[in-house]
Image (cartoon, helix red, strand yellow):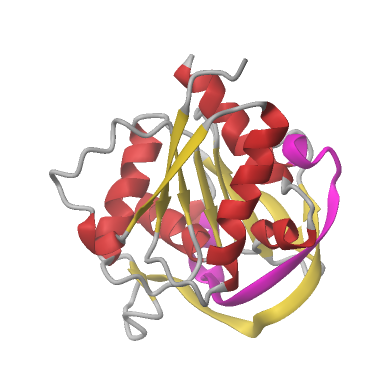
Amino acid sequence: MKATALHLALIGDYNPDVTAHQAIPVALQQASDALGLTLHVQWLDTDTITATTELHAFDGFWCVPASPYRDIDGALRAIRFARERKRPFLGTCGGFQHAVLEYARNVLGWADAEHGELAPQAKRAVITPLSCALVEATDTVRLVPYTRIAEAYGQLKLHEGYRCSYGLNPEFAEALLEGDLIPSGHDSAGDLRAIELLDHPFFVATLFQPERAALKGITPPLALALLKACRQVSQ
C-alpha cells in the first residue's frame, strides 16, 4: 500500500529543451517508485508566484536550473516560504544561486544583494560569473562530512555534471557562510559547489545538476533525500 500522496513544487519556467527539465521529473518518478510513494509534481512558473499564491499545499520544493527566471521575485518568494516554513527544499544550478540570493536579502538583510547576471554592476552582487564557465562539464565534488548532502550520498567524493556560468562571489563568501548557511561541498579547485541550512529539516542547494543521472537510469540520491524529508515532514 502506498503512503499518503506527496505534493512537490518545481520552482522555475518549464522549457522542454532544457536537459535538467527533462531529467527532474524522471528523477522524481524513480525516487518515488523506490520509496513506494505517490507523488504529484507541479511546475510553478516564476511569473505566476505572487504574494497571494497558495504554497501551503506543497510538502516540498525544488528550485530548478535554467535561469534567469522570468520573475526573480516569484522564485525568491517560493524559496523564502520553504526556508521559513521548514518545508524540504532542493536547489540545483540556478536554484543554488537564488537560494544564496534569498538568504542574503531576507536573512542577512542585504536589501541591495543582486544576481550578477541581471545586475552586473551591482556593488553587492553575491552571484557572479565563474572564473571558468562549467557548461556541459564534469568535475569532482568533495562533500563535508556529517552534512545532509553527505548523508544522502553515503560518500564524500562525487563526480557530477554542470551547465552553469555563475556561482557564489568569493568576496561575500565569509559573511554569507558564517551563520546557519554552511558550505557542504567543494570542487577539485576548492571552490564552493554545495550549501545547506542548519536548523532546517532539509534545505540543500548544489551548483551541479545531480538530476542528470536520472537520464542514465540512476536515481539521484538527492531526489531520494528530498522525498524522504517531505514524507517525514508531512507525517
Q: Residue furthest front?
A: 1
Q: Is residue 107 above or below residue 66?
A: above
Asked which quadrant contains residue 119, the reply is bottom left
Q: Residue at x 17, y 52 (%)?
A: 50
Residue 31 sits above or below residue 108 on the image: above
Q: Is residue 3 shown above or below 31?
A: above
Image quarter of residue 86? top left
Q: Name which residue lies at 40% across and 80% down.
A: 117
Residue at 74% of width from left, 47% of height from top? 219
- 109 within the magenta span: no
Q: Quadrant of the N terminus?
A: top right
Q: Left or right: 31 with respect to 197? A: right
Find residue 75 and report its horizontal and vertical position in percent.
Answer: 32, 57
The image shows residue 111 at horizontal and vertical percentages of 24, 59
Q: Position of residue 25 (x, y in %)?
A: 56, 53
Q: Is residue 156 magenta?
A: yes
Asked whether residue 6 is in view, the answer is: yes
Is residue 105 visible in this depiction of the protein?
Answer: no
- What residue appears at the point 65 percent right and 82 percent down from the top-left corner? 135
Please state the extent of the stretch shown in magenta in the rendering: 150-174
Q: Judge from the rendering whether residue 135 lies leftward or rightward of residue 114; answer left or right.
A: right
Above/below status of 134 relative to 227: below
Q: Position of residue 221 (x, y in %)?
A: 73, 43
